[in-house]
Amino acid sequence: MQEIAEEAGVNKALLHYYFRNKSRLGEAVFRRVAGGMFARLAGIMSSDAELEAKVRQVIEIYFTQLSKVPYVPGYVLSELNQHPERSHQLLEIVRTLRSSPDAPDFVGALSKQLAQAARAGRIRPIAADQFLVNLVSLCVFPFAARPMICAVLQIDQRGYDRFMKQRAATLAQFFLAALRP
Amino acid sequence: MQEIAEEAGVNKALLHYYFRNKSRLGEAVFRRVAGGMFARLAGIMSSDAELEAKVRQVIEIYFTQLSKVPYVPGYVLSELNQHPERSHQLLEIVRTLRSSPDAPDFVGALSKQLAQAARAGRIRPIAADQFLVNLVSLCVFPFAARPMICAVLQIDQRGYDRFMKQRAATLAQFFLAALRP
DNA sequence: GTCTATATTAGGATAGAC
DNA sequence: GTCTATCCTAATATAGAC
């Protein structure tokens, strides 16, 4: 609380005035940060665009957005693993997202679209949940695992930046190739 | 320290006797846990097996090993994001791995193998680092992100178990499909 | 090596003035 | 709403007996 107060340029007591205690402050931060991570994903997935366009859009969005706030994935994962109550809070966030007009049951919508494309022979059959987790894994993990990647590949920050730049340019092709019949 | 001592069935002071302070204890735990995550990966990658066999082995190993200790990916990522000094420690771990007889520069070995297979027209060209990160992302992220996946897909622990079981059965096909020329 | 007892500090939280 | 001053607890760490 002391550090946060200093960073914010206010007094420690003021934080307690606004947020009651440390736990509630943590919750407020999590809600704001985690909410942003899923809103656009749900929006894109429940649009009526083609599958290929959706894939490209999701990758594009994640790379441009997360490059501005690269610590977000690591933070959200850490919070969820260390504070079990965050799961409930994320569930509420997702529920309000799903009940919003622009993303009503985006998993169901995606599922229908995948089944239809598979029947038409345009893609290999794949379950919607696997599709989603594959896509998000490939986009989000490299941000959350930056220190791990740098250590294993023996590169520094500049090498990592090059790696991510190449990744942004090639990931869509890789993912779409996996979907080919 | 109190909780750890109780869990271990010893006294708090004994932990300080063995590990000097909390920081060193944390480091010792990290070294042991993180080491296990990469040793087998490096071993498989630097073997002389076919690419397809390597992919299947890595996926198989990660799913069977991590299912026994599903908290490991979340723990390692959290440590790396919250304690910058862990990066150095992981670097040392990787260096000793690389200088060991069974995994000498496994990234380089993989790179040659990928280039060769691409020239022969057996796979699409892909950089070794992207190949590695893609593979590890798809395997490791779903363990680290379990709470996130459960919230977004609106499933409970049983639903997650089903999801992971299906994943273990289908991920190799997905990844290998992406490599097809 | 293992314990009890204790020193020391840091951090969350509140009271009360302004 | 914002601050100063203070309380209180928890947690790291050490001293010293056995």
Image (cartoon, coloured by chain):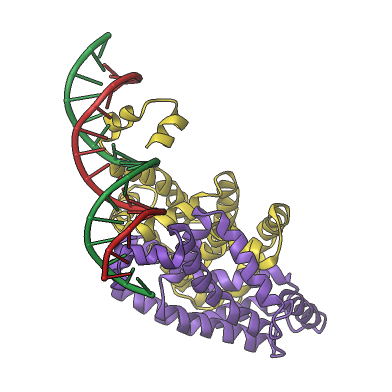
Chain colours: A purple, B yellow, C red, D green
Vertical side of B99 occupied by B132: above or below: below
Quadrant location, the N terminus of chain B: top left
Q: How many marks?
A: 0
Q: Quadrant of residue B121?
A: bottom right
User: Residue A155: x and y, percent?
Assistant: 31, 68
Locate residue B152, reporting x and y percent.
65, 68
For residue A30, side relative to residue A39 (left or right): left
Q: Quadrant of residue A153?
A: bottom left
User: In this view of the protein, which residue sits in the foreground, A124 or A39?
Assistant: A39
Using the rendered image of the protein, determine whether residue A64 is visible from the camera's viewpoint: yes
Q: Quadrant of the C terminus of chain B?
A: bottom right
Image vertical order of residue B4 relative to residue A40, above or below: above
Figure quadrant of residue B106? bottom left
For the point 58% across and 75% down, which residue is it?
A: A38
Q: Which residue is at a point 73% across and 80% down the rendered structure image?
A: A104
Residue B149 appears at what percent x and percent y?
A: 63, 63
Answer yes or no: is residue B133 visible. no
Percent of width and height locating residue B154: 70, 64
Which residue does the image show at 53% across and 49% down from the upper left? B71
Rendered position, A42 above or below A71: below
Determine whether, in the image, residue A133 is placed left or right of residue A168. Answer: right
Q: Which residue lies most toward the right here? A: A119
Q: Is residue A166 left or right of residue A98?
A: left
D5 vs A131, left or right, is left
